[in-house]
Image (cartoon, rainbow, N blue to C red):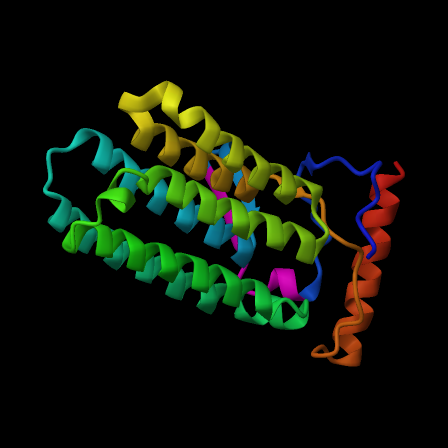
Amino acid sequence: MTWSNFSQPLLSEKQEALDFQDLQGIWHINWKISDLTLYSGSYTRVDQVFIIWGLIATTIFTIAQFLPISWTTQAIFWTALTLVGTASAIALTWFWVSVERLRWVIYGWTILMLSGLALTDGGIFFGWGEVLLNLCPLWLGLSAVGYLFTGVGVRSRALLLVGSLHLLGIVFLPYVAPWQFLTTGGLMGLSLLLLAQMQWDMRSPIAYDLLTPEQKQFNQQQHQKRQLLDNV
């Protein structure tokens, strides 16, 4: 098992020399007023999934914390958002995970999200008290498992750390009992948005079987550019 260079920071500024599979569907944002740049950034499809799920998690748990909406109504709302988020993640990342030989990662996350959704809806519609009392630990635990196996799959210490923080969050929840939903949504949402904003460590490039010779050569050139920038 080859891990990323331990001298490489877990999080750093985003790279500009991206591989072919990372450039597909990338968002380039450049907000300006006249000659003044307000914000500039680029977001790959993986980043876009992080943003989508960060907003979904924050929205769901903030509503649960503050708004007096019935659990049944919230369950319908949660189900719709979770299904939209899951479908979006599959659609946006399919090419990337296929090239990186990581389809099992998206399968794993889909199983986790649908399992969590089934348990949550079961707890609400069938009155499973134990589930209702542990919704926050349930979702933190599912997210932690997802980050940990993804971290192993892409050889990322940053993702392993985020997964560990989610497990620590479960331990911390009893100390913020009145604010469990807000704490859970904050931890899940901020983690995802941070990962979307930063460059996290990952394994070295592999032999990309799905790419053409020209695309592979492009990736080799991009890798060389990244190495030169890292040595500056």
Q: How many numbered discs?
A: 0
Q: Residue at x 89, y 39 (%)?
A: 231
Q: Residue at x 83, y 55 (%)?
A: 2
Q: Which region shows up in magenta?
A: 21-31
Is 78 situated above or below 187? below
Question: In x, y percent, where is residue 94?
Answer: 53, 70
Picture quadrant where residue 110 is located: bottom left
Looking at the image, residue 157 sits to the left or right of residue 164; the answer is right
Picture quadrant where residue 232 is located: top right
Is 124 situated above or below 164? below
Q: Is residue 33 visible?
A: no
Q: Residue at x 67, y 36 (%)?
A: 11
Question: Residue farthest to the top?
Answer: 175
Question: In x, y percent, where is residue 122?
Answer: 23, 56
Q: Would you say residue 25 sits in the magenta stretch?
A: yes
Question: In x, y percent, where is residue 203?
Answer: 76, 54
Q: Residue at x 30, y 55 (%)?
A: 119
Residue closest to the eye, 56 or 173: 173
Question: In x, y percent, where is residue 16?
Answer: 69, 48
Residue closest to the eye, 196 or 130: 130
Picture quadrant where residue 89 is located: bottom left
